[in-house]
Image: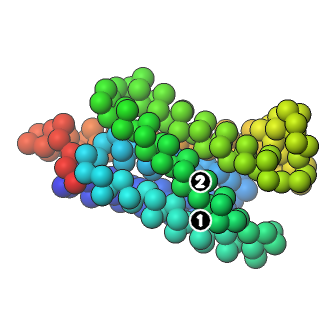
Amino acid sequence: MKTNLLALALILVAALWRVANVFEPSLFNVAPVTALAFCGAAYFRDWRWWLVPFFALTASDLWLNHYHAIEFGYTWSGGEMLLRLACVAGALGLGRLVARRRNLSTLVAGALGSSLLFYLGTNSVAWFADPFYAGNAAGWWQAMTVGHPEFPPTLWFFRNTLVGDLLFTGLFVAIHQFNTVRLPATAGIVRG
């Protein structure tokens, strides 16, 4: 149980980090959005623990939506928020696959896959819904690489997302390993 509480605390800190990093432009999107679900599913057997990332993402999305409305004059639609939740659900699925055969390579691949899923999903929907982008392959490529000229390139956001997800996954795994070594009676067992 102690391992779960520490992991839960790490998930909540990661969600708070996502909210706090909007104040430092160089850290935009260095947020472990999908890693929250990926690690939860890879390490928690009890599915109720998997709900924590969804609540954390929803709460941080609501705050960020309010912040964007004030700072930039735009808000996310309910569909955009649902898409992010769907991407998180995809990361959860990857975490379940990794849980069956958890090792360094599957954890790195799962974190990378979760980040890529989020990036491709959110930017493809932006390309489809935003009239700024041409409705062809060139417009999709623009949405994937440079985005809008008034914002940093979308590849920059992907890089930051990937860094956040990989760092968070590494930290999550390290804390879990540290606790299982410290608590030999519960080594290898994660209960919810």
Dot 1 amino acid type: Asp
Q: Give the CA distance from mark 2 to mark 1.
A: 9 Å
The reply to whether discs 2 and 1 touch (Cβ–Cβ < 8 Å) is yes
Look at mark 2 in the image and give the residue it sits on.
84
Which residue lies at the image location 36% right of the left edge and 44% below the top edge? 41
> Looking at the image, can residue 163 be seen?
no
Q: Secondary structure at mark 1?
A: helix
Which residue lies at the image location 27% right of the left edge and 38% below the top edge? 177
Look at mark 1 in the image and give the residue it sits on.
61
From the top left corner, tell me how far across and down residue 101 is, in percent.
31, 26
Q: In the rendering, which numbered label is found on residue 90? A: none
Which residue lies at the image location 8% right of the left edge and 42% below the top edge? 185
Dot 2 amino acid type: Arg
Which residue lies at the image location 59% right of the left edge and 54% below the top edge? 84
Which of the two residues, 174 or 56, is positioned nearer the viewer here?
56
Which mark's residue is nearer the viewer, 2 or 1? 2
From the top left corner, tell me how far across and down residue 11 is, in percent.
41, 56
Position of 54 with respect to 1 (left or right) is right
From the top left corner, tell me how far across and down residue 23 is, in percent.
68, 64
Where does the N terminus fall, quadrant-wise? bottom left
Work out which residue is located at the far top of the displayed protein and give it.
105
Quarter of the rendering containing residue 183 = top left
Position of 162 with respect to 53 (left or right) is right
Neighbourhood count class around disc 2 (C-alpha, 10 Å): few under 14, some 14–19, many 20 upward: many
